[in-house]
Amino acid sequence: MSERHLRKWRVLSSEYRIETKFLRLRADRVELPSGVVVEDYFVRESRGFCVIFALTPDQHVLLVRQYKHGIAEIVTELPAGMIDEGETPEACAARELLEETGFAGTQPELVRTFLADPTNATAHFHLYLVRDAVPTADQRFDVTEEIDVKLAALDEVRAMALDGRIAAGSQVAAALVALAHLGR
């Protein structure tokens, strides 16, 4: 196999088509290395988000079940949420865990940062591990949230990530990488 010299695309112009609390969508006009010009190459901009793998003192994992409007289904996930303006990913992890579950634990430990969707989005997501998570407050939902909290054993979380009960790609990656980080 030969190594090709890969080159970035050249952005000729950009225009924001949507700018809301929930979505910032940019349309780029780009020139490819071949010289071909592509109109309206859409890119979702985001500060990114955090996924939290939270362990209770008895080694159970906190999971959340909630409705996701994009797919119009109720899904099971690890707690997660968008990074607010001016917020660090670590602070986001602690805040989202508390808001979504009412649990808090040790200082969030960064396990890994991932590219969320590099084809057409700027977002990274950050996987944090929180140990000794215990209930400390009432859940505080965003306007679009209604969340049930569930506990699962480590082996059950692995099975859920592998059999599709945890189905979002970012969530599957986060669960399996966190388990590997824990030697499980």
Image: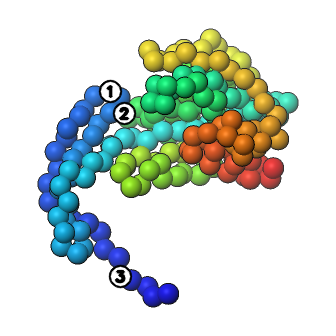
The crowding category of the residue bearing disc 1, from other C-alpha atoms within 10 Å (few below 14, some 14 to 19, many at least 20), is few
Q: Are marks 2 and 3 in contact (CB under 8 Å)?
A: no
Q: Which residue is at a point 78% across and 30% down the rendered structure image?
A: 152
Left-right relation of 65 to 87: right
Relative height, residue 121 to residue 38 (above, below): above
Task: Bin the neighbour count of mark 3 within 10 Å (Cα to Cα): few under 14, some 14-19, many 20 and up.
Answer: few
**Mark 2 or mark 1, which is nearer the start of the sequence?**
1
According to the picture, the residue beneath numbered tag 3 turns out to be 5
The tag on residue 21 is 1
Residue 140: percent from left, percent from top:
54, 14
- Measure the alpha-carbon separation of dots 1 and 2: 11 Å
Q: Secondary structure at mark 2?
A: loop
- Give the left or right position of residue 13, taking residue 49 as reference: left
**What's the mark number on residue 42?**
none
* Residue type highlighted by circle 1: Lys
First in sequence: mark 2 vs mark 3: 3
Q: Is residue 31 visible?
A: yes
User: Depth-wise, is mark 2 or mark 3 nearer the camera?
Assistant: 3
* Location of residue 96 (image quadrant): top right
The label shown at residue 85 is: 2
Q: Amino acid at mark 3?
A: His
